[in-house]
Image (cartoon, rainbow, N blue to C red):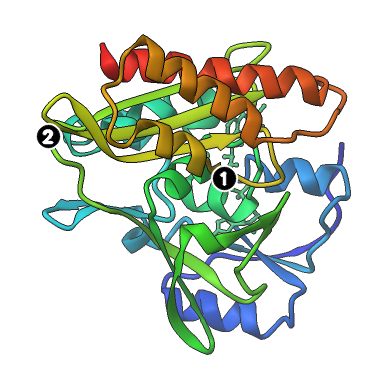
Amino acid sequence: MKLPPFEYACPTTIAEAVALLASHGGEAKVLAGGQSLVPMLAFRIASPSLLIDLRKLSKLREIKISQDGVKLGAMVRWREILDDARLRTAHPLLITAVKHVAHYQIRNRGTVGGSIAHADPAAEMPGIVVTCEAKIAAIGEAGARIIDAANFFRGPLVTALNPEEIITEIHLPPWPANRRFGFQEFARRRGDFAMAGAALFYDEDGRKAKNAHVGVIGVADRPVRLATVQQALNGSTVDEATIAKAEAAASASVDPVDDIHASGAYRKALIGVMVERALLAAAA
Ligand SMILES: Cc1cc2nc3c(=O)[nH]c(=O)nc-3n(C[C@H](O)[C@H](O)[C@H](O)COP(=O)(O)OP(=O)(O)OC[C@H]3O[C@@H](n4cnc5c(N)ncnc54)[C@H](O)[C@@H]3O)c2cc1C
């Protein structure tokens, strides 16, 4: 399908990109990997007058790892995350989740910033940033600001970002060496968006879990944390009985709607199984 007509710009500085975006009063869009935006143009779901390609902004391509955690530039691609050996210890949950994103070709182009901005409720990266309490750095003509991931997603394809802001960086808090984690999702075919998925971690206090973080994707209009599952885990040994309690709490906490892929009831049951499997992986 042919794309609608648009102007094209390829700025070399963030300031230039911000100025271009501001000068078009909401009619311009930034282009990252194009893996979601280009299909949307083809289907006429979006028809911006100007596309601002971020590919020359090398500062947005950096992966920084320090005692403060992991900072991913918005233009970091899925493939670059999987190829960075440091991340296997600096953020194993991130690596495990990204392995489920799409197919090889898409992972070579798609970016973390594009995924967060696109805000598909079934996408892995939004689930990871919400579960891990990440901070999202954005910049616009009014200046730079930091948005908590918990407040970033407002609904399917809707975020707290102003149309004239660009995401620059995603900051994931530090990952202790002995943290236990699991990521599980179910999709009809490998690489498809998840019908339901769970990302979780907890730290250990003796044999008991503490600081449990449990997030789910594909079962609400945005990625969400499940407080009742976290409560079931905190202060408990993660054994068969606790996992059964967590599974039941997960299913009870969501109310997914029916769609062309599955009924809400199916997804409700599925999320319990995803949490169960993620906990089994974490405890193993
Ligand atoms: C067949 C197929 C299967 C897929 N499967 C999955 C999957 O299983 N899981 C998954 O998570 N994704 C999947 N995707 C989506 C893929 O991961 C995309 O790469 C991603 O969602 C968007 O990233 P992008 O860099 O391509 O962004 P683009 O397509 O370039 O942009 C997407 C949107 O984000 C905006 N944007 C991009 N970067 C920024 C920024 N820095 N600041 C502000 N706004 C920005 C754009 O203006 C646009 O509105 C799939 C895509 C395809 C085509």
Element type at marker 1?
strand
| Any part of residue 211 in sight | yes
- Please report the residue visible at 20 percent of the width from the left and 32 percent of the height from the top: 179
Element type at marker 2?
loop
In the rendered image, residue 187, in percent from the top left (x then y), is placed at 63, 16
Type of amino acid under label 2: Ala
Horizontal placement of 170 versus 36: left or right? left
Task: Read off the residue under disc 1.
Answer: 224
Q: Along the line of sight, which residue is nearer the eye, 126 or 253?
A: 253
Ligand 1 found in image quarter: top right
Which image quarter: residue 278?
top left
Q: In which quadrant is the C terminus drawn? A: top left
Above or below, 138 against 144 in this view is: above
- Please report the residue visible at 42 percent of the width from the left and 32 percent of the height from the top: 232
Type of amino acid under label 1: Val
In the rendered image, residue 222, in percent from the top left (x then y), is placed at 65, 47
Task: Read off the residue under disc 2.
Answer: 177
Q: What is the distance, in whole Å, between disc 2 and disc 1 at their CAs?
A: 25 Å
| Crowd rating for badge 1 (residues with CA inside 10 Å; few <14, some 14–19, many 20+) | many
Marks 2 and 1, the one that precedes in the sequence: 2
- Between circles 2 and 1, the one closer to the viewer is 1
Q: Along the line of sight, which residue is nearer the eye, 148 or 54?
A: 148
Q: In which quadrant is the N terminus drawn? A: top right
Q: Residue furthest bottom?
A: 142
In the rendered image, residue 33, in percent from the top left (x then y), is placed at 55, 45
Which image quarter: residue 200?
top left
